[in-house]
Image (cartoon, helix red, strand yellow):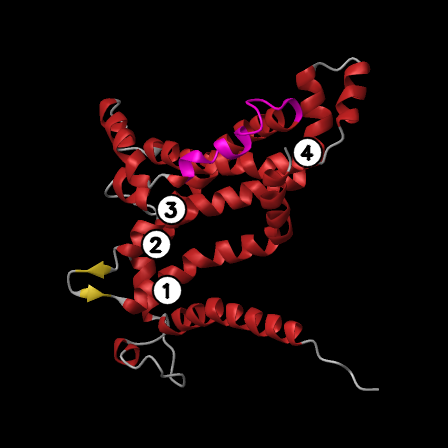
Amino acid sequence: MTRTVNPWSVARALLLWVAALTVTLPLLWVALASVKSPAQLNDPGLVLFVPNLDNWARVFEAGILEAAGRSAMVAAVTVAISVVAGSMGAYAISAYKAGGAATRFGILAAQVLPPAVLVFPFLTMAYALRLDSTYIPVIFAHLSFVLPVITWFLIGFFDAVPRSLEEQARVDGFSRFAAFRLVVLPQVLPGIGAAAIFGFTLSWNDMFYGLILAPTQETILPVAIAAFNTFRGVELGAMSAAIIIAVVPVVIASFFIQRRLVQGISGGAVKF
């Protein structure tokens, strides 16, 4: 029996392989560069070589782990505030149509603006309130794009919760807030977890606000990575090791939220 090969399936498989290689090969090159000597880095095509950990030692001496810790702290605080406020906002939009149908997209309006539009007000307020030596301005700046995304992300999950659950809780004597907290919220906990990881990744990767608003001597991770671009040139080996440190948490997070990510992105947009 002759099996017919669908040309569209073959084309789709090829495209997927091209996409996978486009993402994987640069990461592989960076990983190899992190264990090469400066002389070996001058030959990008060199595959067989004796690896060394000098670049990793240089990165740890430069305080990259401390910078990663500061980035994690900023992202954790940003996500905690965003999840609390975003879950209530998403529930209001989903269950009570707060703000009308346009609100679903309206909450993302700030995303179309370049960060340079918002950084000046944040910088001015930081100096006026004498917060320029703290991470509070960075957290507020990250809230400007993490909170709307998490809210939009969670709308689809709240849409999937039957309203009858809340109505039954109200009949049983629950207040509106108690019904939300004890009955509705547990139904969307997996979505909240995925939204939190997604928001953490957004904050973790931000460099622009961190470069301008974070304390100069105690930078966050993306800025610390950029610091390997010195006046003597780019320290490719050390920068590659630092990039690997920054990428690992994002890759692990993406593995756990990939299915929920698609559900959240599509669910927040399609229902009116």
Front tag of 4 and 2: 4
Give the alpha-carbon distance from disc 4 to disc 1, as whole Å.
43 Å
The reply to whether dot 1 and dot 3 touch (C-beta < 8 Å) is: no
Callouts 4 and 1 close, C-beta under 8 Å: no
Residue visible at 33% across and 32% down? 137
Relative side of 59 to 10, left or right: left
The crowding category of the residue bearing disc 2, from other C-alpha atoms within 10 Å (few below 14, some 14 to 19, many at least 20), is many
Q: Decide: marks 3, 2 in contact (CB < 8 A)?
A: no
Crowd class of label 3 (few under 14; some 14 to 19; many from 20; radius 10 Å)? some
Type of amino acid at the residue the image marks with label 4: Asp
Q: Nearer the viewer, mark 3 or mark 2?
A: 3
For label 2, the residue is: 64
Magenta stretch, residue numbers = 95-111
Q: Earlier in the sequence, mark 3 or mark 4?
A: 4
Image location (x, y in percent) of residue 135: 34, 35
Q: Which residue is mark 4?
A: 159
The answer for how far apart the CA atoms under marks 1 and 2 are is: 10 Å
- The amino acid on which the numbered mark 2 sits, given as a three-letter code, is Ile
Give whichever of discs 1 and 2 has the lower sequence position. 2
Circles 1 and 2, Cβ within 8 Å, touching? The answer is yes
Q: Give the residue at mark 3.
A: 206
Q: Is residue 125 left or right of residue 136?
A: left
Disc 4 from disc 2: Cα separation:
42 Å
Q: Residues within 10 Å of mark 1 (few under 14, many from 20)?
A: many
Image coordinates of residue 199 in percent, x first then y, are: 50, 42
Confirm whether the magenta stretch covers residue 110: yes
Q: Which residue position is annotated with label 1?
A: 241
- Which quarter of the image is occupied by the C terminus? top right
In the picture shown, does residue 264 fall above or below 226?
Answer: above
Mark 3 to mark 2 CA distance (whole Å)? 16 Å
